[in-house]
Amino acid sequence: MKVGAVYDTVYLEHDTGEHTENRQRLEAIVLRLKETGLWERLVHIVPRPATFEELRRVHSERHIRYVRDLADSGGGQIDADTVVSLHSYEAALYAAGGVESAVEAVTDGEVASAFALVRPPGHHATRDQAMGFCLFNNVAVAAAHALDKYKLERVLILDFDVHHGNGTQDIFADEPRVNYISVHQSPLYPGSGNMEERGAGNIFNVPLPPGCGDGEYAGVYDEIVMPLGRRFNPQLILVSAGFDAYWSDDIASMCLSTSGYSQITHRIKALAQECCGGKVVFSLEGGYNLEALAGSVEAVFGVLLGNEKIEDSLGGCPPMEKPPDIAPLMVRLKKSFGLS
Ligand SMILES: [Zn+2]
């Protein structure tokens, strides 16, 4: 079972200084994969830059030129969270293009599945705006590529980053060939992602209260994500893979462990095998605790490679005084999504 990985040092050139989203994230992941011997078991896919026309499928011309011109002028802040440096435009082109390269490798059958280890991340970038550490929406560019180049009619985007992917929702809200399912913490940045936001009936938001861990996520996948996925029957699955729902990640208040990420990956892999010959492409979004990030990405690759037992070297979430009860929410979600 060949598993692809996209990586290039160009992703380190998006220089955000002391920012939470910095080059050390990718360096920690690559180091871990090399230390554990996983690196040499992967098929390394060389990323290419996305073309202007490919970006234009999901972004306005004004937005693309804004990011390019800001980088060309030496960089600056787009908003309080989002930084552009001299080489950020180039890195962002390769981030979007890298996910496209992964889609090409999976669709052409060179690898069974792939994970694009890219930055800057993408899922907050809307059609017309960079925000939340994101410049271009990598997963959206890749989904549009799958629709346009490969003439696919059903692409599923799963988003398990702890934040709602408002940008992906914005871009595909009127595109029934794409289904978007996001499981995220609410309330939390960027404030969107209510279950009432349904787009053209193709948007499915699962807003979870703080404190949800491996058990809650497994239930959400078994009872909501997997049934929705089967119903849509995608030809390709893209995953906005953020690891900031990890219990020790300070940016949010969820309780996933590396075992939890393994369980989620097992389910996504099974869904892909059921629906589309296993074709799934993961794309890195958030995850800011370096140890947790490296361990969780290692766990995802382990599952994709078919390892039965994934070690949880960092331990699970410390027990909570009052764990959240999401049963009533699950009932409402299933009703709203026509699953019950
Ligand atoms: Zn996030």
Image (spheres, rainbow, N blue to C red):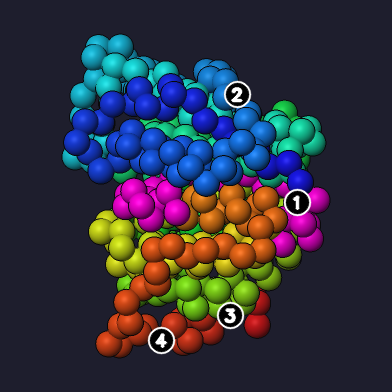
Mark 2–mark 3 Cα distance, whole angstroms, equals 44 Å
Check residue 325 in the rendering and tell me which mark sits there, or answer none: 4
Q: Which badge, 2 or 1, is on the more N-terminal residue?
A: 2
Residue range highlighted in magenta: 270-295
User: Residue placed at 45% from the left, 54% from the top?
Assistant: 295
Q: Which badge, 1 or 4, is on the more N-terminal residue?
A: 1
Mark 4–mark 2 Cα distance, whole angstroms, equals 45 Å
Q: Is residue 180 above or below residue 73?
A: below
Q: Is mark 1 within 8 Å of ligand 1?
A: no
Do the residues under discs 4 and 3 have CB atoms within 8 angstroms? no
Mark 3–mark 1 Cα distance, whole angstroms, equals 29 Å
Q: What amino acid is labelled 3 in the image?
A: Lys
Element type where label 3 sits in the image: helix
Mark 1–mark 4 Cα distance, whole angstroms, equals 33 Å
The verdict on residue 294 being magenta is yes
Q: Position of residue 309 (x, y in %)?
A: 61, 65
Q: What amino acid is labelled 2 in the image?
A: Val
> Which image quarter is the C terminus in?
bottom right
Q: Residues within 10 Å of mark 2 (few under 14, many from 20)?
A: some
User: Residue placed at 24% from the left, 14% from the top?
Assistant: 74
Q: Which badge, 4 or 2, is on the more N-terminal residue?
A: 2
Q: Residues within 10 Å of mark 1 (few under 14, many from 20)?
A: many
Q: What amino acid is labelled 1 in the image?
A: Gly
- Quadrant of the rendered image containing residue 64: top left
Mark 2–mark 1 Cα distance, whole angstroms, equals 21 Å
The mark lying in front, picked from 4 and 3, is 4
User: Residue placed at 38% from the left, 41% from the top?
Assistant: 28
Q: Which badge, 2 or 3, is on the more N-terminal residue?
A: 2
Q: Which badge, 3 or 1, is on the more N-terminal residue?
A: 1
- The residue wearing badge 1 is 278
- The residue wearing badge 3 is 335
Q: Position of residue 117 (x, y in %)?
A: 50, 37
